[in-house]
Amino acid sequence: MRRLLDSINGPQDIKHFSLAELEQLAEEIRELLIHTVAATGGHLAPNLGVVELTLALHKMFDSPKDKFIWDVGHQSYVHKILTGRRTNFSTLRTTNGISGFPKRAESEHDAFGAGHSSTSISSALGIALARDMSGEKYNVVAVIGDGSLTGGEAYEALNHTGHLGVNLTVILNDNEMSIAKNVGAISEYLAKMRTAPTYSKVKRDIDFLLRSIPAIGESVAKAVERLKGSLKYLLVPGILFEELGFTYFGPIDGHNIPLILDVLTKAKSINGPVIVHIVTHKGKGYLPAEINPDKFHGVGPFCVETGEIIKPSGAPPSYTQVFGNAIVKLAERNPNIVAITAAMPDGTGLRNFAIKFPKRFFDVGIAEQHAVTMAAGLATQGKRPVVSIYSTFIQRAYDQILHDVCLQNLPVIFMLDRAGIVGEDGATHHGVFDYSFLRHIPNIVIMAPKDENELQNMLYTATELNAPVAIRFPRGSGIGVELQSEYTKLEIGKAENLSSGKDVVLLAVGALVEPCQKAAALLADKGIAAGVVNTRFIKPLDGQLIRQIARDTGIIVTVEDNVITGGFGSAVLEYTNSQHLNWVKVLRLGLPDKFIEHGPRNYLLNKYGLNAQGIADSVETFLSQFGARK
Amino acid sequence: MRRLLDSINGPQDIKHFSLAELEQLAEEIRELLIHTVAATGGHLAPNLGVVELTLALHKMFDSPKDKFIWDVGHQSYVHKILTGRRTNFSTLRTTNGISGFPKRAESEHDAFGAGHSSTSISSALGIALARDMSGEKYNVVAVIGDGSLTGGEAYEALNHTGHLGVNLTVILNDNEMSIAKNVGAISEYLAKMRTAPTYSKVKRDIDFLLRSIPAIGESVAKAVERLKGSLKYLLVPGILFEELGFTYFGPIDGHNIPLILDVLTKAKSINGPVIVHIVTHKGKGYLPAEINPDKFHGVGPFCVETGEIIKPSGAPPSYTQVFGNAIVKLAERNPNIVAITAAMPDGTGLRNFAIKFPKRFFDVGIAEQHAVTMAAGLATQGKRPVVSIYSTFIQRAYDQILHDVCLQNLPVIFMLDRAGIVGEDGATHHGVFDYSFLRHIPNIVIMAPKDENELQNMLYTATELNAPVAIRFPRGSGIGVELQSEYTKLEIGKAENLSSGKDVVLLAVGALVEPCQKAAALLADKGIAAGVVNTRFIKPLDGQLIRQIARDTGIIVTVEDNVITGGFGSAVLEYTNSQHLNWVKVLRLGLPDKFIEHGPRNYLLNKYGLNAQGIADSVETFLSQFGARK
Ligand SMILES: [Mg+2]
Ligand SMILES: [Mg+2]
């Protein structure tokens, strides 16, 4: 059979396709998705779920004139394949290759960039309002998952859109899960709709009502009451959305192209906002992903035949795993410890905790704000909430950290996983701002472990401390140290002096302690004696040690995987300034004041000079220019 | 008549009150509220609206064992009066007096602090979960306004609470407005409920249905369709909340104490979360506030007899007013300018814009996240959105500023009103973190005007610039300069050198330029030649000027009304560090690393050394210690 996909260079190329051709194309796209992601890693299951939807959207609408906005955006691969990025789709998520998320700079078909959840209806509304003000005519379509609908911003946008009555279409892509199984009343509501009684069932009930009423003393109200459970969904399907001002269609089978096209045609004719509720199967068409959609939500390279993940053998356990084990162990001894995740029980390593302590585990859905304030509430009653959220996603709860936790000085522990460079997910996902957005908040203690053992110790220390704490650690494997079974309480604000050096001292944080130690070895080869300090506490800083280094060496190099603006290096500058240590020379290494692109984590660390060689080179250059002692 | 209020020292003192006594007490409390707020300023109208509700709550429940959580918290005055703070209620919002918001440090009856909106259900859920885990028995009651319900965090919390089925009571205090008239589909929904058909009306309709069905070919579905508008609210009142897993009661009259007590009794007996929808009148019992609840939402001192606000005569127009006029003028010439507020059309000075350009004005409700992403959407289509949100409230949208606006480098303009010390509203409302949480975000331009003219020029400059911009300005009156009618485009990143000084240069931002000029005069009297620079751009900094000052003077003093951690002074340290200007001595004046208490703005500026005398003193001391030239 001729491969249809080879002729697709833009959405116009599918306009004349028959239904049979579209269905053939869907299969070809699935093949491409599976084989590409098996090589590059990426978000497989979400994209397998939206193949038919995306084909129907591009058949019905005219991108880029019509605007598609993909919530989170990890489900935009099919859209990318159909909009001129088929031939370089193999470069997905690779250096200089195409992004795993919609990106305005990449294509005029990517109407709005994404990466974080629940923004699509807001941006779609902005675009639709601009269109109406300018008297233009085009369609605006936001595609949002049932998981993203648990985020408060999506509700804010529904509420405002329904109020304004603007023409736009929201496709609710309901696959009964976000990343893990969904939580929240709204997902139960969607489930009820999916199994709502059919018209004929309700008609039978009404017939029964009609027959029973005139007979005896049963009041109308009571009879109605018995009916209401089944009746209300027929009376007003999607009543929750209708109440918010939307016209609701659905639920319909999201893998049935003619059905989707039929409903989209109806939706187009409606004046005002429309919600089209489609039901899709995450991982559809690839059995391992259908069976285990969580695992294939975001996945590394895998074997297409078996579905087995290709892992570098013998890699040490990840920081996430170490945290997951440590919190279980600590919770066994300390009944006040509770754990909170925002839709990431697996990603954050909390699965075992959830199994072991189901009553002390809370998955709030994609609702970081609520997660943090709820934790503050728990803390007021003596609990020790551990909120585990990726660094980039906790940005959503900046105000709650400040206003609900730190202002009241409540002992909530924030585990910021995936801090620093995360790699292939790119600019929207790097956790490179957390030192800068946390450091200025009063009362908070900020730690970063140099290795897995220290992660355990820091978590333990935090559970024993009566203050808000953030512990920041990177994505991926630890450095492979042997794990101690007993945890040690760290002294707050005390750094660890790993090695002394008369020429310069590297103040390193977290994941960059190890490369700094290697850099010191490289520098030693060149006759430069560089000490290394494991900073441990970004706040409060170890002032005593900094003063000591200032006296002994006069040259400090700060090394962090955070933007240097407002980051750890700036904390050291602030300290030396406040102590009038003007004669200390400080070199700040970190990430520049720009958004960092996607690419392998090590590649990016190298590129930005944060590997051992890069650090050593920077230090050598600095010393050659400014190394003269005071 | 004996004054009942004089005997109230705690909630136990009203337990035995008869209904008549409670109603008398309500009137006495209203008297106290009106006369106190007339003297101190504060949130009058919201508190007048909840007098009966608060009495009923304290009659029914046992605080502090039972927990009340007041959303936003500006309606907690009555609660404070009833819980041991009656005698010092006259110190409301004054220095060392009681806070205008619930504050855990102030009373065990304040179960959770507040100030920002839409956090109450989250914190209540956290408290209720802690209670259940510990096997304790008490009631948790969150009181939230219809306005706060537009905030996404409230929805996240409803969704999670409904899912968990935890015992807690949400009182929806529906006064048909937040601060201004409410917007959003949810408020229209509440309005529909308030006017829902009565049971007898629906019974008549059902009778009609019964009679008409057997007759002719009218299908059941069609008949049902005609009924649904009136039927659904009777079938399931509060269906939206019921769908989210709550048991709904209401709407009921929130000024009818026995009715509230009756419904609270029912609510107490329900297993699982309950929402009690009460309707209150903002400003109830004080005619000027009933007529104009917006004006008396948060109000300065006023005359009780006339309701007239007591204003210092001849004060120059506020920055807010200047902004409000300037944006109208600019919008007349530039049709792409649109304005967005989050429930503050008056507070942000956008009322005239809204009247003049209703189609270009958007009040999104208390939904800062949505406001910012929607603005990003508008900007992608060539609009110039001006988002006017108080500095402290834009904290809610930190992630959206970073991820939706700056990452895509979209030209959204943020007007951060009430930046710096706001005064009497205290720790939850000071806008003292914005330089620190914005400065590290790539692409953003941050400005602060030294006076009203510069505010106009900065707004104009921003509308002509293709980049995200934040303009930060203080609460209250400008300094009284004559307003230019034509605006000047400022050069990006260029500071204004106001005066030279050979001994030291003060780099001042925004509202602190004026006191720095006065400080320079004070210093001149002491023989110290201090130059003053109006920094204008916090990002990008005027590096050339800083290098020049470094060469000429060697001593820089940065002066900001922001926390010094990560703030403007740190930007200067980062710059001098990056340029290896090690010999420059920098003194950073600003706010310390702690939450700042409430009190008059000038009092707090003085206390923290940011008035002219304080600045001069700090500079003099610094020079005496470190003034020796390099
Ligand atoms: Mg989903
Ligand atoms: Mg209200």
Image (cartoon, coloured by chain):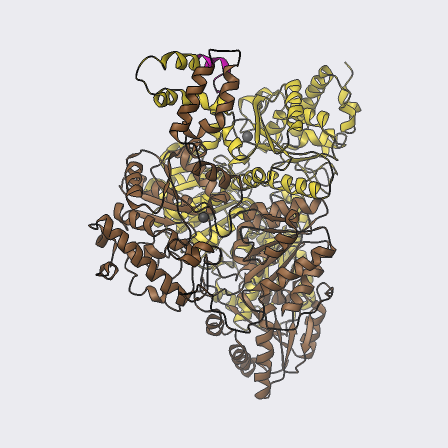
Chain colours: A brown, B yellow
Picture residue at 52% right of the left edge, 62% below the top: A432
**In front: A203, or A422?**
A203
B559 versus B200 height, above or below: below
> Which quadrant, please, contains the C terminus of chain A?
bottom right
Q: Position of residue B442 (x, y in %)?
A: 46, 60
The image quarter containing residue B428 is: top right
**In front: B183, or A465?**
A465
Q: Position of residue A548 (x, y in %)?
A: 71, 74
Residue A450 makes an appearance in the image: no
Picture residue at 56% right of the left edge, 28% below the top: B248
Q: Position of residue A475 (x, y in %)?
A: 54, 64
B450 versus A524 height, above or below: above
Q: Relative to residue B466, is residue B372 drawn left or right?
A: right
Residue B384 included in the magenta stretch of the image: no
> Which quadrant, please, contains the N terminus of chain A?
bottom left
Q: Relative to residue B170, is residue A424 drawn left or right?
A: left
Chain part drawn in magenta: B193-204
Q: Position of residue B477 (x, y in %)?
A: 54, 40
Secondary structure mostly taken by the magenta-highlighted segment of the chain: helix
Q: Relative to residue B558, is residue B327 drawn left or right?
A: left
**In front: A110, or B113?**
A110
Residue B342 makes an appearance in the image: yes
